[in-house]
Image: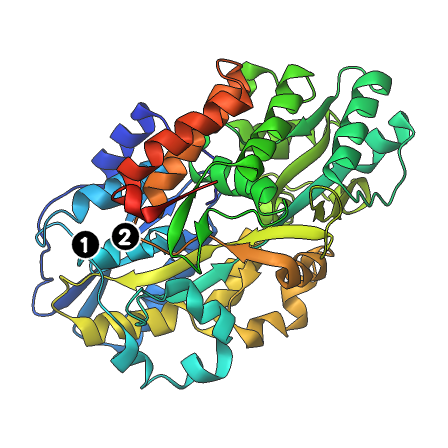
Amino acid sequence: MRRALAGSLLALAVAAAACGAEPEQESAGGKEIEVLYKVEPTWPHLEKMLGDAKKQYESTHPGVTIKLTPVQGNNEAYYTKLALLNRSADSAPDLYYHDTFQVNADVAAGKLAPLDDLLATWPDWQAQFPDSVKQAAKGGDGKIYGVPISTDTRGLWYHKDVFAKAGLPVPWEPKTWNDVLTAARTIKQKAPGVIPFSMYSTKIHGEAATMQGFEMLLYGTPGGTLYDDAQKKWVAGGKNFTDALTFVNTVYREELGPKLADAHNAKLAQKILYEWFPAAKLGIALDGAWVSAGWTPTSTQPWPEWKDKIGWTPMPTQNGEAPGAVSMSGGWVMAMSSYTKHKREAFDFITVATNKDNSMTYSVGTGDLAARKDVAADPKYSAENPSIKFWTDLASVTHYRPAYEAYPKVSAQIQEAMEAVTSGSKSPEEAAADYAKALPGVVGGADKVLAR
């Protein structure tokens, strides 16, 4: 979900032109492995990692060429392009960078190849990847469909100077949602010209709105969840759902958040990172562990002062219920197409791309939490980022999205509800009711829904 850099039709058009859709071609006299990935001007780190891996792989695998195919644009443009290419064996890439929330939908559609037999031949899989991380790419059939590149957590970032101007304490340790809203109201009153609080809450931000925004609220309510594991049913609305939307409603009706034009701006994340926080024009942001990567020396717009100016703290549960804080985790994997004709060669490239050195390049550059134990234990991993330990420790209170085929469609309905509340076109109760009404249609029937 990197995240919040939402797309546009123009970006998609550019992506399509850049990506091409010609059938797979073998290089002269050898095999060719096509790798699809996303790239943005302010996020070049994955491309560097894959470029390094291509050189390393081709130097030790004569006769095999790695074709790197970038998709320019945000996550939504990337998801769309990948789905289009995956419609046909002729256009599907051999390997692709894949958001974990889409893995099970592709497994169900027969688009992904299980990797278990190949992983059994790779010592690093057992030695360096924690069991919790391996779950990120596990299908409903128990098989593994990708090698994790990264994981992440979510919480609150805040500007210390803004807090000082508003008379708020630093370090800041909110215990309830009301503490967060009270701080935002204080900033609005005592620091004119500053946006008190920012979160993603509109459809243009896609999964970032669902995961960084809504789910960080829902899973902080007592018993709040999208899916009841015991009854194996999707939960239709209810008080938890409405309470989460009420928080969003409060942010926008009390003018504690960005202007509506900014809430709908595809470049909201860039405004937060490169404009508002450095200029002390934003008080609090509900976002992910990776945010500080936008300010480190490897960024396209370094901000060395961030270590002194910015603080970080957990997002509290609704009323301080145990364990006191909430987080959500996702991540990205390198997945293999079921259409590839060269599974062994493709898997070998995955092992090179996700070795320690290349994983270090990715983690340090992106700010994502390391998937490998040896990277996490290396001092170079956290040398430039004093917040790493905090975000890593949030794993103790984190939750994961329901790993089911219907999730992407459920997420889209949540975004509909959030946007309606953000704009004020519906009350939280009305938006929750509409979500409950639409849910059976996106999860396969009323018998798969649990009313609350």
Up the image or down, 183 lies above or below 45; here it is above
Residue where numbered disc 2 is placed:
105
Q: Position of residue 81 (x, y in %)?
A: 25, 40
For mark 2, give the secondary structure: helix
Identify which amino acid the numbered label 1 is placed on.
Answer: Ala
Which amino acid is tagged 2?
Answer: Ala
Helix, strand or loop at mark 1: loop
The quarter of the picture where residue 417 lies is top left
| Residue appearing at x 27%, y 73% in the figure | 115
Label 2 Cα crowd, 10 Å radius (few <14 / some 14-19 / many 20+): many
Number of other residues with Cα within 10 Å of mark 1, as a class: few under 14, some 14 to 19, many 20 or more: few
Q: 205 above or below 377?
A: above
* Nearest the eye: 74 or 418: 418
Report the residue at 65% width, 63% height from top. 396
Disc 1 designates what residue?
A: 109
262 w.r.t. 365: above or below: above
- Please give left or right for residue 371 compared with residue 47 in the image: right
